[in-house]
C-alpha cells in the first residue's frame, strides 16, 4: 500500500524568506502524481502544485517549486519570498495513475513571522 | 463559475442518529470524491462516484453510503453515528478524461460534523 509521510508537524519562517517543506512517499508503481495542497483556516483545500512522476523537470508555480527525487521517493515544496497569506496547513498527496483516490500525509503547519 | 459547494457548513448530531451531507461539483466536472478529515490529520478517502455509481471505496464501514444524481451532485450518508465520526467532511470534484486520467481534484469548503 502507498503511504505519504510528512515529518515536520510545524515550520516557521520570517516573512520574505524561503522555506522548504518535506515529504516522502512509498510506492511500488512507476506512474503516479504528487501534489501539494494548502489548507488555510477557512478549511478549503487549495491545490498549490502538481508533479507527474514521468516528468524529470521539477514543477514550478510562481513562488512555489518542488524538488522531486523519484529514486529517493522525495517530494519537497519550496516557498520563496514567503508572505503572510502563505500561513496554512500544507499537505502532500499521492495518486497512482490507475487509482483515483488521493493518499495524504499528516500535514505541516506553516507559520509566517512578520 | 461556481466552485465546489457543500451543505451544510456545520452540524451537530447525537450518537446513533443519521446524517446526510450534500455536494455540488464544479461546473464541467462529473466525478465526486468524499474524504473524512479528523482534527489534526490528513484526509482519508471514503469513496468516489462517477456516472451515478460508486467506483472506488476506501476503508470505511457500510454505515457510510452515498449517491450521485444525474446532475452530478452527490450525497454522503452516515448511519448510526459514533463519536469517532466527528470530523470535517470534504467533497472534491474532478473530470474524467478517459485514457488521459482524471483532472485535478477541486475541493469544497467542507462540512464540520460534531457527534455528541
Image: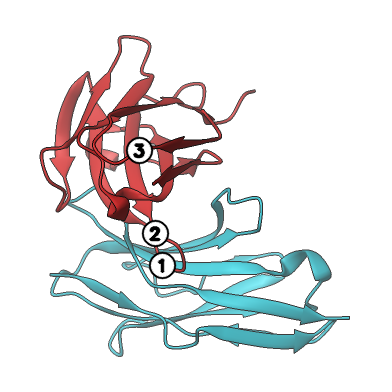
Chain colours: A cyan, B red
Residue beneath disc 3: B14
- SS type, badge 2: loop
> x%, y% of residue A94?
32, 64
- SS type, badge 3: loop
Q: Residue furthest right?
A: A114
Vertical position of residue A40 compared to residue B4: above or below: below
Q: Residues within 10 Å of mark 1 (few under 14, many from 20)?
A: some
Q: Nearer the viewer, residue A54 or A46?
A: A46
Q: How many marks?
A: 3
Which residue is located at x 30 percent, y 90 percent?
A: A72
> x%, y% of residue B24?
46, 23
How far apart are labels 3 and 1 at the CA level? Answer: 23 Å
Q: Residues within 10 Å of mark 2 (few under 14, many from 20)?
A: some
Q: Residues within 10 Å of mark 3 (few under 14, many from 20)?
A: some
Look at the numbered discs 1 and 2 and tell me whether their residues touch, using CB distance below 8 Å: yes
Which residue is located at x 49 percent, y 87 percent?
A: A8
Residue beneath disc 1: B41
Quarter of image, res B102: top left
How far apart are labels 3 and 2 at the CA level? Answer: 18 Å
> x%, y% of residue B101?
28, 42
Horizontally, residue A64 falls left or right of residue A23, namely right
* Chain under disc 1: B
Look at the numbered discs 3 and 1 and tell me whether their residues touch, using CB distance below 8 Å: no
Residue beneath disc 2: B38
Q: Quadrant of the N terminus of chain B?
A: top right
Q: Earlier in the sequence, mark 3 or mark 1?
A: 3
- SS type, badge 1: loop
> x%, y% of residue B62?
10, 38
Horizontally, residue B41 falls left or right of residue A64, namely left
Amino acid at each position: 500500500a502507498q503511504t505519504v509521510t510528512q515529518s515536520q508537524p510545524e515550520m516557521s519562517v520570517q516573512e520574505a524568506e524561503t522555506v522548504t517543506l518535506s515529504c516522502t512517499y512509498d510506492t511500488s508503481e512507476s506512474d503516479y502524481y504528487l501534489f501539494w495542497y494548502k489548507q488555510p483556516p477557512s478549511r478549503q483545500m487549495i491545490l498549490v502544485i502538481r508533479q507527474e512522476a514521468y516528468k524529470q523537470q521539477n514543477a514550478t508555480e510562481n513562488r512555489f517549486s518542488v524538488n522531486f527525487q523519484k529514486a529517493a521517493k522525495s517530494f519537497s515544496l519550496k516557498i520563496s519570498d514567503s508572505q503572510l497569506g502563505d500561513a496554512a496547513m500544507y499537505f502532500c498527496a499521492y495518486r497512482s495513475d490507475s487509482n483515483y483516490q488521493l493518499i495524504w500525509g499528516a500535514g505541516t503547519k506553516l507559520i509566517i513571522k512578520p | 463559475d461556481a466552485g465546489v459547494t457543500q451543505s451544510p457548513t456545520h452540524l451537530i448530531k447525537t450518537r446513533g442518529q443519521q446524517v446526510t451531507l450534500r455536494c455540488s461539483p464544479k461546473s464541467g466536472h462529473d466525478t465526486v470524491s468524499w474524504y473524512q478529515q479528523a482534527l489534526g490529520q490528513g484526509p482519508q478517502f471514503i469513496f468516489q462516484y462517477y456516472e451515478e455509481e460508486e467506483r472506488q471505496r476506501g476503508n470505511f464501514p457500510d454505515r457510510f453510503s452515498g449517491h450521485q444524481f444525474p446532475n452530478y451532485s452527490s450525497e454522503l450518508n452516515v448511519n448510526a453515528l459514533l463519536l469517532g465520526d466527528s470530523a470535517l467532511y470534504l467533497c472534491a470534484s474532478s473530470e474524467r478524461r478517459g485514457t488521459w486520467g482524471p483532472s485535478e481534484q477541486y475541493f469544497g469548503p467542507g462540512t464540520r460534523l460534531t457527534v455528541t
